[in-house]
Amino acid sequence: MYDSLFLYSSFLKAELKSCSCDSSPGVFRVRTVYLPRCRNRQEKRRNARLSLKMYSHGSESLIKQARDIHESELQKFFSRLVKLLQGKELGHETVDSLQRLLLILSATKYTKTLPPELQRRLASLLSSSAEQLQVLSSAVLRETLPLSGQEVNYNQENVVQLNSHAASLLLSQAQSRADLSSLCAQLLRGLEGRQSEGSAHSLTHTLPILNSILTHSPESLTEDHVTLLSKKLVDWLRYASITQGGGASSGGFFTGQRSRQPVPTAELDGTVSGDFFTVLCVGQGFTDDQWMNVYSFSMLRHWLLTNHSVSNGNTTADTAHRLQLSLSLSHSFSNDDRSEVDGSVVSMVSATSSSSRLLPPRERLREKAFQYCQRLIEQSDRKAQKRIDTDLQKACLVEAVCILDRVCEEDTSLVFRTFPCIKALFGRLSSDLSFARVLLPIAQFYLHHGETAAVDCESVWNLVFGRFPAELFNDLFLAHELLRFLRLNLESLQARVPQYTRSFPNLLKFLAWDSPSAVDDFVDLLPSLVTTGTAVELLHTLLDLPCLSATLVLQLRSACQPISDTGGRALLSLDAFRSTSYRGLFLFLLRGEAGSGDTIDRLSTLHKLLAEAADWPRVVQCSQTVPVLLHIFFNTVVTVANDKLLAHLILVMLERSSLLLNVPKYIKEIHRVFSCHLLRLCKLHPSLVVDQSHELLEFAGATANVYSKEDIYTHVVWVLGEYLSVSCDSRCSVRLITSCFETLEAVLFEITSSAPTPGAVCPAPRVITTLMSALAKLASRSHDLIPRVSLFFSKLRTVTRGGSVPWCNNEEDLVAIVTRGEELWSLLKAPGVAQSVLTPPTHIASPQWHQDTNVAMPLRLRALTSLTHPQ
């Protein structure tokens, strides 16, 4: 469907055009309508919107016509298309008809069968010299059913004409593993023997097909297939020609066809290549085997990663043979063997090595891959003459190190031969951060094999977790690759790299800079960063992520010229960032490692300095990811923390609820997260309420929190009323219950006896009812308090009889509050019943049968209610 949409859009003409439909006998026709020339930017935008609307209507009409076409008209169109394909020249009319055919076939979900003659003609177009016809015919055939009784059969003659479009068709029509295996056999037979000039081109398409088959169905390849392809890869990698293709001229006035002499390939610095050909060799032209060298290297790593999935009955024997011969392998590149595949094109090399020749095919490929990568690393040290070649060197270094990593995983004896080269490469590149994406595979190599080789990896991890995030946090490609590296190696990093868990202030810079693209990675990484030693500081850091995001923006702006806003006034936050008075605040946010302190004392000052950054898009995006990460943090910390740490986290939540950057909706979302997990922590560990009773009562006793922190205040009050009980903690005394009662009573009396200050909203009804319930629960546990709370409920009923009250401006809310007060007052008249109802024992409170919709209890309760309360 993607191909059809692509082709469909291509024939609709791209630049500010639209489609309209003309009906014609048989098949619709596309007519292009051009929009007038735009004079200014606003006209361009207006015409673009008009074009999009016209394109939408035109495309819908075309698809509708394609779906409604009659069978008789369709057969006429097929006949006309066959006649067009029989012609000697296939012009614009043929291309237009093929595009219409593709739209007809792809407009419905039903697969159609084409006439045999048309299907054969379309198949012949796969080998056309015009790529547009190849694309169209391949797309059309993928939308149709093969002919009845036809099997996937691409014989040797057709393999010669193979191209990427024919290959995709072959793979799409394979119906079983047997078909794929047969296709592999036919393709691999095309690799044997000497390649003619006509068939050499098809080899460049054979390797991608085999690679795709290996990816999706490795069982389709047999051990013989793997052996043959491994031998061919050895040929192409190690024995490609070392002279330039195309017969490069030696120069001179009388230069002609006969005077052309073979010219050797060159290195990227312009010197003559002195060793075997690689992807980093350059020339004016390349031979077919040199192109196959490039293709082989591009698929080598994937081949090494996946060819072990092929069933092999000789694995044990091959392993024993490899162990016997591994010590006799030579380190020299000049002592290599020639290929054993008959008829292959190989370059003249030095005498063969008997030890290498005795290796099984997979082992020989591993050895040649090792030598090839060593040569690439040597070539990468040369100064390229073109900038594009410098980028090529970096890309080849990444691939070479990854291949060496894989080779060493398969054969640990190669680790000691490889590490000197990798160590030297790291020493050469570590000071240049432009090679950061090359250094990541080197870090992967150290992680996998550093313990085997007993080498010190500290400098590697200081670079990866230190300089990379600190200096390259705005490199999106590096951020993606580094975070992916961390996710893939999470268990190894936790076990072997102590710098990992301490580096979260640095790693979170990637999230602070580009939250939308990094949040998925940190959802996976964050649990591994939560430990008993880092939990408190990590919580502060997560809450300060919007501040970190703003600070990173200021850090980059500070390196440039002063930036002014639209009014010509310099940014105050940028001036503060450059000021020595506030430098310590920003340096703490930019710290690279944990352990320097959980937070800073002047957070409120920092928030004032960054107030103008609250609406910056990057800061707003970052603030939207914090609640998600906080949920993950709390869900993880309850599995690793002890009661002392959890008590500390409760204090942090209460303290930081008033110390947050004032980003729109950010504070409210954080309060909601705090409320949810405060409730969960106290439910899992009720003793925390007694441990932190002083701090909780101090928070609940501040009347200002009723208005500014409704969510978290409501839950703190509920927690005090629910878990401040002897049944939850034997340390809960009558004195503590009385102290809590008096604190909540004072707040409730204050907010219900006076109107709110001008400009302030009325207290939420949920806060008032929660306070009333908490007082009733506490009074039921200390009966001396019942008269006091009962007096309040009676006064509440008396006051509300007069009509509206200043602390509640909604009549329905006021009725609900009064009703709750009367219910609680009625319960407290029977103290024993009140305690059982307000604080039921655990075996009664759970399960809550009256709330379970899967049992009959709720239905019975509703029936009794309807009977006892007549309408």
Image (cartoon, helix red, strand yellow):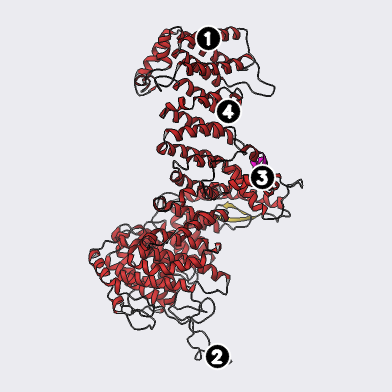
| Residue name at image x 44 percent, y 67 percent | 422
Q: Residue furthest right?
A: 568
- Near mark 1 (Cα within 10 A), the count class, few <14, some 14-19 or many ≥20, is some
Frontmost residue, 168 versus 296 = 296
Q: Which amino acid, mark 2?
A: Thr
SS assignment at label 4: loop
- Near mark 3 (Cα within 10 A), the count class, few <14, some 14-19 or many ≥20, is some
Q: Mark 1 or mark 3, which is nearer the start of the sequence? A: 3
Frontmost residue, 445 versus 698 = 698
Which residue is label 2 attached to? Answer: 255
Label 4 and label 2: CA atoms lie apart by: 88 Å
Q: Mark 2 or mark 1, which is nearer the start of the sequence? A: 2
Q: Position of residue 126 (x, y in %)?
A: 43, 67
Disc ID at residue 582? 3
- Near mark 2 (Cα within 10 A), the count class, few <14, some 14-19 or many ≥20, is few
SS assignment at label 1: helix
